[in-house]
Image: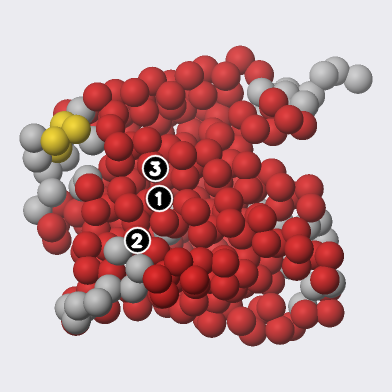
Amino acid sequence: MSSSECTTASVGTAAPVAAATTKTAAWVTPVELTLLGAIWGGSFLLMRVAAADFGPCALVEVRLTLGALVLLPFLWKARAQFTPRLWLQLAWISAINSAIPFVLFAWGAEHAPAGIGAITNSMAVMFAALVAFIFYGEQIGARRALGLLAGFVGVAVLASGKTGGASAGPAVLAGTTAALLYGIGVNAIRRSLKGVPASAVAAATLLTASLLLAPLAIYTWPNHPVAALSWLSAILLGVLCTGTAFVIYYRLIHRIGGPRAATVTYLIPLFGVIWAWLILGEALTLSMAASGALILGGVALSQQRPKSPPG
């Protein structure tokens, strides 16, 4: 998982949020938010398990294809809205919002603990705010600026640490670059695909990304038998952490709105580190803990909206 799921689904938020909330038991929303955080946090564990066997491109191709198949009914329902011009826009958006970031995170999973990717993934929220400020003139405000600064300091701390005696820097750079691409992608989606259902956009994005990546995935497909555990991890990554997780996220957006649903961002690094510790025995280093606190604090501040001017 990833923040690609969070950012892509911000398009076409359903209107009757309050009405939907009153019809649902109060405990359902926190349970679904926690479940979603656990699923998306687990995606980094699954990449860590499968990436060495598949290689980044082949693994991501499996993930994209299976995720697109799960979401295909949403795309079919909205197919009339997808003109040839829209598909052309989706081509480059799919590359920067799905294909390339997924490959970067998969590559990082080969070279560093799963928690590294989960922590850097959270930077997507801050990069989205920064890109909106630089290119679209959206106001940041003092709190959000402080959040951005805290997040970047957290990345520096994370990159300076070592795991298993090796520098985490390359994996941190890969994850941070992926988060930056997510930030660019969400702004492009918000402005280019207004009025198109978020679920259909997500399905189309995954499908297009799988087609774009297919030649490279075929070329780098492993020439050795892939272990059953790696196949299981890849299938879960596509079906559960990509396709099914989107469905849960859309339910939350419909019920409580996009901004509240996006708070799942805070849970992803937590579960990413917990799953890696419980299942793979990966330790939480001091630099990971410090950087995680800085980045998540920065995410919290960066989600603060600047106050509207009086009058």
| Residue 291 visible (yes or no) | yes
Residue 13 vs residue 6, the one in the foreground? 6
Instruction: Measure how far apart labels 3 and 2 are at the Cα level.
Output: 13 Å
Circle nearer the N terminus (1, 2): 2
- Which one is in front in this view, the residue at disc 3 or the one at disc 2? 2
Mark 1 Cα-neighbour bin, 10 Å: few <14, some 14–19, many ≥20: many
Query: Height in image: 214 above or below 3?
Result: below
Q: Are marks 3 and 1 in contact (CB under 8 Å)?
A: yes
**SS category of the residue bearing label 1:** helix
Point out which mark residue 56 bears.
2
Q: Residue furthest front?
A: 219
Q: Which residue is mark 1?
A: 104
Horizontal side of 265 relative to 51 (left or right) equals right
Residue 167 vs residue 137, the one in the foreground? 167
Q: Please name the amino acid that badge 2 sits on.
A: Pro
Point out which mark residue 175 bears.
3
Query: Height in image: 47 above or below 189?
Result: below
Quadrant in the picture for the N terminus = bottom left
Quadrant in the picture for the C terminus = top right
Total marks placed:
3
Horizontal side of 170 relative to 199 (left or right) equals left
